[in-house]
């Protein structure tokens, strides 16, 4: 059984399924740093997952499809921001509304675009390519695990590094963090709260867009309804568990990816599929419980 | 004067709710001096400084800084002119490092990135120059209140402030930290900075300031040099009252002792001693007023008696029973009622109906229940009669408490607390910010309670209220009992001011003998 689970395939799959969670978690990280509720991540990702194949179908270009998804993500995120920041509505309600809207709207749009209600498979839209990394792919084992992923996966890792620089090494990052944590303090030294909130919203929305695009252009080659399946929420968990640092977030995303990957591998064994599919979610709950427990202990100590 | 740096002339500010916070106030500050801005709470100091800093806009008047008229619209513009403010509530981002807080908004850059090295160096240089010992790399959440204040001062200095406004800087400091702060302020003065020091502690002001401007009730009282003034004079300037309301009451008939505090001390979470060895007695049929400048432990005193805190030392006896370790509920059941300082935060639940607010303290009582469920009919009847008795102006008992005016909201609190038939009533600022009619009504109800043989502890920052309503007066200063007067008519407002501001203090014998 150990052999079935811990093969190079397992690790390869882990990275593959980690990618959308990583994007979701990075988006949540930026939301949270800017002091914005990240509960709408799921719905924004779902909408973007549809926008990507539709965009690439219309423009006949995978890259444009991804960019359109990012733009749609940023717009939805700003909409959420406008409703909660400027109109001061309750973020949890606005988030639920956004998520519900996304699941209904996407089905409506695919039906309108393709005449089907389940997926955009019939469009045969362009997808994002997988790439073999020269040199790396020659190395045994490591090559099998790390080479041959989607361009978006590598982009995700690159973005994690860039975000680490942005947040901790640039004035913009410092201002985003100050606006998110103590807006009054930021305001008292003349920083525009709205400006940095919207910078966070656009960044996080675009990250949701990448996550959504990955699901429908790389993970599979089409959009199918409800395909985000809680990854936005798992991203929130990963952000929290990673304590809001880019590296912590990436490690947490990797852990959730491993759980997902484990569930996939275990399906090869003769175990009830329904039970196995719960594994990622059970691990999410357990991980959050452990994390919260350790943090509450730390606070007391 | 030729070296005048700031001139605020005839500043008037009326808030939209009609409160006149400043009426033709003047403030003239010389370059290189430490200028005290004094006055009681609500005297208009903060409003005046907010106007100077551009956070609030004046309705009339003129401001000149370095000879030029200024009219800033926000904090950023004012900072650019060279005016900086250290707020009473610190404006720091807790999770960031000290140097990050200092350079926030004016980050030095190296290409795309923050130039961390030169930022840290900048903070270090400034800290050394003004003897403000801070570790640039420490996280703000890990440093003490005193150090946080130094970070705030650094923040202002780094932005090139020539004029620094410090809003009650010593209110949060321990005596040692205060001493250190004063040394730093004098060093700043030597370096040519001008400081406006907001305070109501006369001793501190006399220690470091050159000139004093006093405001009272939103009006300008005067400016005087410290060297030509005595503490008594300053106090007379600051403390005064316009008698707006009088109360009719019979002479008090004191009964047996109801509440006894013996050496009560309380240290808050920030490790500041808020109450220090407080002892006094309250008898039945007595209104005991607690006078004091706000923040001298009066609020903590009320909350200690009512069971808010755990780590209180000493004894609090109600009818000779120690109530110190009891829960709020148990204390209520022993016959204590409490009108809290902040009616909106603690007094009522805003989004709940009036009748629900009125029964919230007695919802467990058997009288209001029938077979384990609430007896709605009885509750509504009770609510209706309370609304009538206490003249609460509302549509009906179903209206949300948050929809009421301040005075009527306070009447809801008063109705609930008085109708539970308490033996001891703690009234913490019972008439703050309410109209004259409601004020008079609440006073009348308090006197009624006294005549019915209850004990009343009246805490108020309103000198008029304390002097008019109380039978006896305790003065609090710096968490200690500064004076006790068995008969409130024995003391003038002027003398009271001396005790409130810490200029005079009774010895233990005097307090007992009084």
Image (cartoon, grey):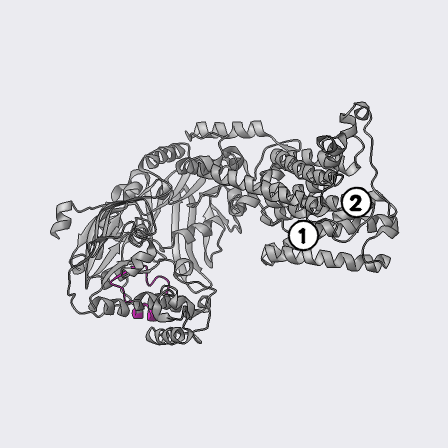
Which type of secondary structure does the marked residue at label 2 adopt?
A: helix
Front residue of A270 and B513: A270
Which type of secondary structure does the marked residue at label 1 adopt?
A: helix
**In this view, B171 is above or below A138:** below
Mark yes or no: residue A97 visible.
yes
Chain identifier of the residue bearing label 1 in the image: A
Chain identifier of the residue bearing label 2 in the image: A
Residue at the far left in the pictured view: B513
The residues colored magenta run B421-441
Q: Earlier in the sequence, mark 2 or mark 1?
A: 2
Q: Residue at x 58, y 35 (%)?
A: B107
Magenta run includes residue B26? no
Contact, mark 2 vs mark 1 (Cβ under 8 Å):
no
Say the numbered circle drawn on residue A285.
Answer: none
- Residue B332: percent from the left, percent from the top? 31, 59
Dot 1, crowdedness within 10 Å: few (<14), some or many (≥20)? many
Front residue of A220 and B178: A220
Mark yes or no: residue B94 visible.
no
The quadrant holding residue B210 is top left
User: Dividing the image into 4 quarters, which one contains the C terminus of chain A?
Assistant: top left
Whether residue B288 sits left or right of residue B156 in the image: it is left
Say the numbered circle drawn on residue A78.
Answer: 1
Magenta run includes residue B429? yes
For the residues marked 2 and 1, what is the alpha-carbon distance in whole angstroms? Answer: 18 Å
- Residue B401: percent from the left, percent from the top? 44, 67
Respond whether the residues carrying marks 2 and 1 are from the same subunit.
yes
The quadrant holding residue A106 is bottom right
The mark closer to the camera, 2 or 1, is: 2
Q: Residue at x 40, y 61 (%)?
A: B20
Say the numbered circle drawn on residue A66.
Answer: 2
């Amino acid at each position: 059984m150990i052999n079935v689970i811990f093969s190079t395939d397992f690790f390869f799959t882990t990275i593959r399924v980690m990618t959308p969670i990583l994007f979701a978690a990075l988006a949540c990280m930026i939301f949270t740093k800017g002091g914005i509720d990240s509960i709408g991540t799921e719905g924004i990702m779902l909408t973007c997952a549809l926008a990507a194949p539709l965009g690439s179908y219309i423009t006949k270009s995978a890259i444009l499809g991804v960019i359109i998804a990012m733009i749609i993500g940023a717009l939805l995120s700003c909409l959420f921001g406008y409703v909660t920041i400027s109109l001061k509505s309750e973020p949890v309600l606005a988030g639920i509304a956004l998520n519900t809207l996304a699941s209904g709207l996407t089905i409506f749009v695919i039906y309108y675009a393709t005449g089907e209600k389940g997926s955009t498979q019939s469009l045969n839209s362009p997808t994002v390519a997988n790439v073999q990394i020269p040199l790396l792919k020659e190395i045994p084992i490591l090559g099998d695990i790390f080479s041959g992923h989607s361009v978006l996966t590598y982009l995700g890792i690159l973005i994690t590094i860039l975000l680490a620089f942005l947040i901790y090494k640039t004035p913009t990052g410092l201002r985003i963090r100050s606006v998110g944590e103590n807006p009054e303090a930021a305001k008292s030294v003349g920083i525009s709260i709205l400006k940095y909130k919207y910078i966070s919203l656009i960044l996080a929305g675009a990250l949701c867009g990448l996550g959504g695009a990955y699901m429908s252009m790389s993970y599979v080659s089409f959009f199918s309804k409800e395909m985000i399946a809680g990854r936005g929420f798992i991203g929130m968990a990963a952000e929290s568990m990673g304590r809001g640092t880019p590296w912590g977030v990436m490690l947490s995303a990797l852990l959730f990816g491993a759980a997902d990957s484990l569930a996939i591998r275990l399906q090869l064994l003769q175990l009830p599929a329904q039970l196995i599919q719960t594994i990622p979610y059970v691990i999410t709950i357990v991980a959050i419980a452990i994390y919260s427990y350790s943090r509450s202990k730390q606070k007391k100590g | 004067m030729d070296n005048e740096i700031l001139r605020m002339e005839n500043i008037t500010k009326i808030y939209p709710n009609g409160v006149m916070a400043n009426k033709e106030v003047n403030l003239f500050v010389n370059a290189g001096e430490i200028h005290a801005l004094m006055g009681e709470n609500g005297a208009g100091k903060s409003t005046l400084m907010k106007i100077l800093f551009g956070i609030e806009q004046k309705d009339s008047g003129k401001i000149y800084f370095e000879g030029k008229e200024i009219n800033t619209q926000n904090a950023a513009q004012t900072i650019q002119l060279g005016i900086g403010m250290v707020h009473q509530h610190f404006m720091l981002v807790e999770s960031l490092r000290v140097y990050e807080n200092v350079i926030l908004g004016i980050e030095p850059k190296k290409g795309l990135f923050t130039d961390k090295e030169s930022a840290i160096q900048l903070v270090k240089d400034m800290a050394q120059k003004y003897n403000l010992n801070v570790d640039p790399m420490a996280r703000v959440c890990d440093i003490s209140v005193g150090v946080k204040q130094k970070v705030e001062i650094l923040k202002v200095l780094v932005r090139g402030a020539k004029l620094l406004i410090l809003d009650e800087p010593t209110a949060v400091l321990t005596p040692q930290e205060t001493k250190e702060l004063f040394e730093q302020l004098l060093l700043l003065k030597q370096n040519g900075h001008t400081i406006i020091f907001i305070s109501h502690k006369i001793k501190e002001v006399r220690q470091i300031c050159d000139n004093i401007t006093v405001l009272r009730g939103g009006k300008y009282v005067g400016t005087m040099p410290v060297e030509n003034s005595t503490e008594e004079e300053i106090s007379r300037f600051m403390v005064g009252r316009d008698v707006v309301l009088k109360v009719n009451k019979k002479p008090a008939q004191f009964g047996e002792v109801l509440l006894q505090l013996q050496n009560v001390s309380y240290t808050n979470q920030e490790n500041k001693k808020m109450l220090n060895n407080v002892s006094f007695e309250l008898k039945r049929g007595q209104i005991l007023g607690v006078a004091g400048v706000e923040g001298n432990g009066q609020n903590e005193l009320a909350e200690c008696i009512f069971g808010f805190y755990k780590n209180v030392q000493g004894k609090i006896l109600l009818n000779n029973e120690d109530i110190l370790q009891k829960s709020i509920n148990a204390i209520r059941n022993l016959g204590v009622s409490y009108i809290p300082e902040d009616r909106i935060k603690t007094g009522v639940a805003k989004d709940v109906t009036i009748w629900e607010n009125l029964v919230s303290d007695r919802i467990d009582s058997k009288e209001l229940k029938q077979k384990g469920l609430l007896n709605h009919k009885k509750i509504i009847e009770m609510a209706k009669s309370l609304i009538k008795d206490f003249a609460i102006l509302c549509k009906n008992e179903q209206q949300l408490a948050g929809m009421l005016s301040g005075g009527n909201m306070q009447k809801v609190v008063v109705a609930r607390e008085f109708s539970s038939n308490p033996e001891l009533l703690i009234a913490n600022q019972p008439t703050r910010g309410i109209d004259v009619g409601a004020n008079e009504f609440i006073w009348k109800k308090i006197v009624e309670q006294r005549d019915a043989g209850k004990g009343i502890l009246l805490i108020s920052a309103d000198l008029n209220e304390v002097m008019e309503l109380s039978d006896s007066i305790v003065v609090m200063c710096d968490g200690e009992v500064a004076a006790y007067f068995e008969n409130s008519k024995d003391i003038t407002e002027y003398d009271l001011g001396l005790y409130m501001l810490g200029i005079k203090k009774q010895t233990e014998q005097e307090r007992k003998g009084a």
